[in-house]
Image (spheres, coloured by chain):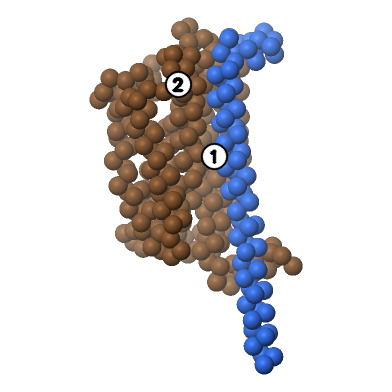
Chain colours: A blue, B brown
Amino acid sequence: MQFDSLTDFLNMGGYAFYVWLSYGITVFSLATLIFFSVRQKRKILIEISKKMQREERLKANRSNQ
Amino acid sequence: MWKWLHSYADPQRAYNLSGTLLPWFATLAIAFIGVGSVWGLLFAPVDYQQGDSYRIIFIHVPAASMSMSAYMAMATSAFIGLVWQIKSADWAAAAIAPIGAVVTFIALITGAAWGKPMWGTWWVWDARLTSELVLLFLYLGVISLYASFEDKVLAARAAGILAIVGVINIPIIKYSVEWWNSLHQPATIKITEKSSMAPEMLYPLLINIFGFGLMIGAITLVRFRAEILARNGMRPWVRELAKAEGVK
């Protein structure tokens, strides 16, 4: 372990701002990317199922006439 | 000899195979990046010149090197899609592009945050930095071209040509620090000779580089699966999935 205490660790030898800025932006942008990537699948499947319902409605209306 | 590969171009098989591979990639990526980052932040020794600011290296170098590897992967997929008309390859290229853009963005931002305390400036228009910025624009170009066409076969062709032409930028990034005078230091990790870096610093760095590769692989699989579903909305097997997970 290179640091004596948590404050020492957070201080990063005086470079706290730059080091934590780098790690912070990295975590934030990767988390955002992963969030939107994982959400895609559900969104697409819901879209497809809505389309299927629309098609079925159309088919039902056609057979009523 | 390679004929068995063809069956994996089938969307359903590609979808299922990606689903099988995904947990492995995700778990290993988390493990590697976890170990590499904790090691790098807490246990790697302080640099005698740069103090603790150098700890940015443990994300900067993995992001920068993987931004180029991801580009090569995307361009290779685009090439396969363009030459052999394999649609799955086009979808893979489309899946990688946004990931590459984010990783390139990370490489640029962490580079700036490291440059400020060490060089005294956030940014200089020198060869390494500028060519890496061009890489970001290439990724953004591929993303927007692919999004611009309703017909995704046409979209993949346009985006694919841009991706392939953009490969010229990769050796420029790689050798920029040797061809031109640059504030940026030359490579510390060398494959053919001894790396100019202490092993206590090098190991966590290599672990994180590998971890970033695995992470890009994992996110690619997630996006590739979504892309397969989006492009195959008329297929019965996709409609089954949609019925199971869609609105009731």
Q: Are marks 2 and 1 on the same chain?
A: yes
Residue at 62% in and 64% down: A47
B115 w.r.t. B127: above or below: above
Mark 1 residue crowding within 10 angstroms, few (<14) / some (14–19) / many (20+) = many
Q: Secondary structure at mark 2?
A: loop
Residue under label 1 = B215
Q: Can you say whether B3 is above or below A62 in the image? A: above
Q: Position of residue B238 (x, y in %)?
A: 59, 67
Label 1 resides on the chain identified as B
Instruction: Choose the circle earlier in sequence order: 2 or 1.
Output: 2
Judging by the rendered image, the residue that carries numbered circle 2 is B122
CB under 8 Å between callouts 2 and 1? Answer: no
Which circle marks residue B89 in the picture?
A: none
Residue at 41% from the left image edge and 53% from the top image edge: B145
Quarter occupied by residue A50: bottom right
Seen in the picture, residue B68 relative to B227 is either above or below; the reply is: above
Image-based side of B173 in relation to A64, left or right: left
User: Foreground residue, B183 or B60?
Assistant: B183
Q: Position of residue B2 (x, y in %)?
A: 37, 58
Q: In front: mark 2 or mark 1?
A: 2
The secondary element bearing badge 1 is classed as helix
Please say if B100 is above or below B3.
Answer: above
Instruction: Find residue B172 and report its image quarter.
Output: top left
Label 1 amino acid? Met
Amino acid beneath label 2: Trp
Q: Residue furthest right?
A: B248
Quadrant where the image shows the C terminus of chain B: bottom right
Instruction: Quote the CA–CA distance across marks 2 and 1.
Output: 28 Å
